[in-house]
Image (cartoon, grey):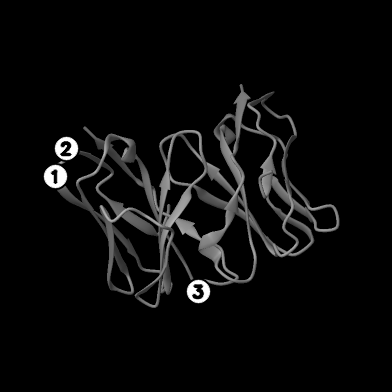
Amino acid sequence: QKEVEQDPGPLSVPEGAIVSLNCTYSNSAFQYFMWYRQYSRKGPELLMYTYSSGNKEDGRFTAQVDKSSKYISLFIRDSQPSDSATYLCAMSDNTNAGKSTFGDGTTLTVKP
Amino acid sequence: DTEVTQTPKHLVMGMTNKKSLKCEQHMGHRAMYWYKQKAKKPPELMFVYSYEKLSINESVPSRFSPECPNSSLLNLHLHALQPEDSALYLCASSQETWGNTIYFGEGSWLTVV
């Protein structure tokens, strides 16, 4: 079983919809939780970063971390066609940021 | 726009060639990384440099040779690659190696023919 499981998708929604992207994990040592957005043929772009449990909001994006359930989510409100990309969750413990464990990614398409 | 710059964006090389990928960051980060990403897969860590010293080599074949000339630059020297090495090579950096998020460059697309 993988350390990080991400809802595989693909996901297709109409413009303006609320999108929920989710990951579960098994390693209790994870303390840092990230969401990356990756457009086709580009490098991953850091979207959200959360330390430990709680919610974090940035514009249309909200990241939630529930350490008791080992579950993280990214919500996108008022989704736009420009949000169409692959979203990767990533997590790390307090040892090496570069050894973050990534989910396999969820590909999202927002249709106009 | 990413503050991690990678060159070249695209590279085609033969199996007997020697080439290099280059990466530069001006964020004052002390940790730099090389990742390899195949299609529809997440990035896989290859090497970690911390304060210009190699700290992690994820059992990468010797045909990939990293170099960190200074705190802002990271190179990946390529020699005698195989077609299965064709992938997107990503450079990344972070403030330190622990407890920090990593910032990726746009990547270098490598095709080995």
Q: Disc 3 is attached to a residue of which chain?
A: B
Residue carrying label 3: B96
Residues at discs 2 and 1 in contact (Cβ within 8 Å)? yes
Please state which amino acid type lies under the numbered disc 1: Asn
Q: Quadrant of the N terminus of chain A?
A: top right
Q: Residue at x 55, y 65 (%)?
A: A97
Mark with earlier residue (1, 3): 1
Provide residue A98's location: percent of width, then percent of height.
Answer: 51, 62
Q: Is residue A98 left or right of residue B66?
A: right
Which of the pair B13/A58 is nearer the observer?
Answer: B13
Q: Residue at x 43, y 38 (%)?
A: B38
Q: Residues within 10 Å of mark 3 (few under 14, many from 20)?
A: many
Q: Residue at x 59, y 40 (%)?
A: A104
Residue carrying label 1: B17
Residue carrying label 2: B14
Q: Residue at x 59, y 35 (%)?
A: A83
Foreground tag (2 vs 3): 2
